[in-house]
Amino acid sequence: MTEAKRGIAAMIAACTIWGLSPLFYKQLDHIPPGEVLAYRTLWSFVFFAGVLALQGRLRVLGEALSTPRRALLIFASGFAIGCNWFGFIFAVHSDRALEASLGYYIFPLTAVLFGRLIFGERLSGAQWAAVALAAAAVATLTAGLGVPPWISLALAGTFAVYGILKKQLPAGPVVSVTAEVLLLSPIGIAWIVWAGTSPDAVTHLWLAASGPLTATPLILFSYAAKRARLSTVGLVQYLNPTLQFACATLVFLEPVTRWHAIAFPGVWLALAVYSASALAQDRSARRAASRASTPGTSVT
């Protein structure tokens, strides 16, 4: 198996774990979402710190927090992903996993829009069309249900903010996430001490499993990102919300209204337009790079 194929296999595995994670968190719906988040944070730190210790890289954790600016950025990114985790757990516990899947569907388009607004990144006509289609789908769902899909928007927004903050960090994904959950751990401990429900032993085992469940797909994603083309990684990521959608509709039997039946295909169409544009740009960039590397070829 080539390195690229290993990368794709790792990406599929990561997205499968993410996509089926609602089945896991549904088993903890008797525990308040905030408490589940607190334990998830603590056990994620234990797991990630163990990985770094096995790699002999614990000292890198100190380097990641070596300046006040880095520490502040890491805390901000940790807070963003913590809000995202809480929103997802809350959605599953409150029988709104369908909204969670919609949030992760529209996340790529939200990230593109944030890139334009914050970093001034240029968007092609197709990308603007994709953003407009997604906005129209969300507006339709809002009008039909009488309330915006706040969970979807919050999940897409917090994950996009998390991505923006991560771009500012020099540390790698495993080190930075370890630092993030380290800084969030005091909040998690305080929550458990003051508002904990004293779960039984079996529940504690489920809560402990949230650590490797959080860490494993991230490690797989990091492995995949280094070996597979980014356009391929981007397309495979849609497996995550698709499996979440399947969990919500086929396992949890959440109702799909006619407004959902309009909005979801609208978002899927927007993603198809965006993906086609991204693939075209990727092919164009690779052709340009190939011409530039060919002796005697000039690029004007």
Image: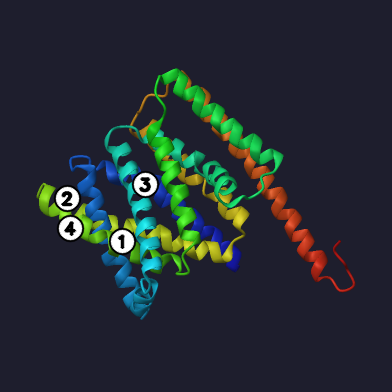
Q: Position of residue 52 (x, y in %)?
A: 35, 74
State how far apart marks 4 and 3 are (Cα): 19 Å
Residue sitting nearer the eye, 118 or 59: 118
* Marker disc for residue 189: 4
Question: How far across and how far down the image is residue 278, in percent?
Answer: 66, 48
Residue at label 1?
181
Disc 4 versus disc 2: distance between alpha carbons? 17 Å
Who comes first in sequence, dot 4 or dot 3? 3
Which image quarter: residue 296? bottom right
User: What residue is pinned by disc 2?
Assistant: 203
The part of the image, by quadrant, that contains residue 257 is: top left
- Left or right position of 198 against 140: left
Which class describes the residues within 10 Å of circle 3: few (<14), some (14-19), or many (20+)? many
Residue 246 visible: no
Q: Residue at x 30, y 70 (%)?
A: 49
Please name the amino acid that badge 4 sits on: Ile
**Of label 2 and label 3, which has the lower sequence position?**
3
Q: Which mark is residue 84?
A: 3
SS class, disc 4: helix
CA gap between label 2 and label 1 equals: 21 Å
Q: Amino acid at mark 2?
A: Thr
N-term mark: 4 or 2: 4
Label at residue 149: none
Q: Residues within 10 Å of mark 2 (few under 14, many from 20)?
A: some
In space, the residues marked 4 and 1 are separated at their CA atoms by 12 Å
Say what secondary structure mark 2 lies in.
helix
Of 231 and 136, the residue lying toward us: 136
Q: Earlier in the sequence, mark 2 or mark 1?
A: 1
